[in-house]
Image (spheres, helix red, strand yellow):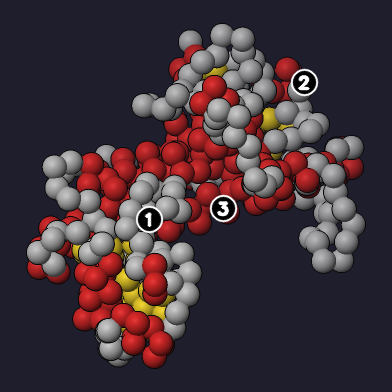
Amino acid sequence: MTEEIAAKRLKTSPVVIGTHNGHFHADEALAVYMLRLLPTYRDASLVRTRDATKLADCHTVVDVGGEYDAAANRYDHHQRTFDTTFPSRKTKLSSAGLVYMHFGRAIIAQRTGLPDSHADVTLLYKKLYADFVEAFDANDNGIELYDPKSLNGNKKRFKEWGVTLASLVSDLNNPVDDPLLPPIVPATSLDVSMNPQAAEDSCFLQASDLVGTSFVRKLALAHGKWLPARSTVIEAYNARLDTDPSGCIITFSGGGVPWKEHLYNVESMHPDNPKILFVLYPESEAKDSRWRVQAVSVSQDSFQSRKPLREEWRGVRDTELSEKAGIDGCVFCHASGFTGGNVTKEGVLEMAKRSMVD
């Protein structure tokens, strides 16, 4: 029966997306934008209401209605019994996660030009959820970033909520008339003369654009930069003994490689090999580019290096650094020892090798 209802709605022209009116949140703002990335919804109109009769006429409804039924295009998560999560994750879904779980592969295939069965689409599908969408689910469901039971009384040193996408969406619930901000225009789901919530709908659409374009940018970077870097990191890891017999230093022939996540993944597949301590790469693609050495952190989210550059070099530059290190061409060593520079590849390699010696 639900399949028949969905098919009937699909034939309706134009397609209408429904969500609730009133105070809006980041999850439904993202859900609506993601749907509109697909051909079926590209020209869809939007109705923001809690009127069950109006919602019943919508092709797709998100974040309202008390129903989760993908066959009927109903994606609410507020039901008492709702406990759906993304595959292999533990965070309960919001409307953003529900829409992404069902439409994410199609969106990625649409944006990248790959078939949705392609292995790269699967990688991007998992990455975009973990890196972007899951935070929307956690925020809307009131899930703490840290498990309070594991904190042992530790406190955060600064307030992170002031610059999250969710907080910026929340700000848009309170429109401000300022010449530096976009005008509050009646770009609404219904004709302004028939819609008393025109200004509110306009703010919602601004919020949807804010989170939606951020999602598209994340996807574009993951597809254009992160995914190609995977093979680059694997190649460098496999050639690590060519860089240094210790097997603890790898070299990239080009700069700008987003290597960290890939390196930890590669290392996890080779647990018996020595950990990589230093990464070498040129600062630019120029033939005479200077080179960088960067210490690998103990984990992806840590600022602590597995093996920082030598303590006596830290905060020292140029000739003074070259004299202290006994290495020609030194440019700098960061005060924390996590990175340094030299005019040549051979120079940064020597900086890394000497730092491995206690």
Quarter where residue 68 is shown: top right
Instruction: Give the residue number, with chain letter if any, for mark 3.
Output: 214
As drawn, the label of residue 258 is: none
Residue 108 percent coordinates (x, y)? 40, 46
Tell which tag, 2 or 1, sits nearer the viewer: 1
Instruction: Give the residue number, with chain letter if any, for mark 2.
Output: 51
- Image point (23%, 74%), residue name: 349
Q: Count residues near mark 2 (Cα–Cα under 10 Å), then give few for <14, some for 14-19, many for 20+.
A: few
Residue 356 percent coordinates (x, y)? 24, 63
Mark found first going from the N terminus, 1 or 3: 3
Tell me the CA gap for discs 2 and 1: 56 Å
Q: Is residue 136 visible?
A: yes
Q: Is residue 239 visible?
A: no
Secondary structure of residue under mark 2: loop
As drawn, the label of residue 305 is: 1
The kind of residue on which mark 2 rests is Asp
Tell which tag, 3 or 2, sits nearer the viewer: 3
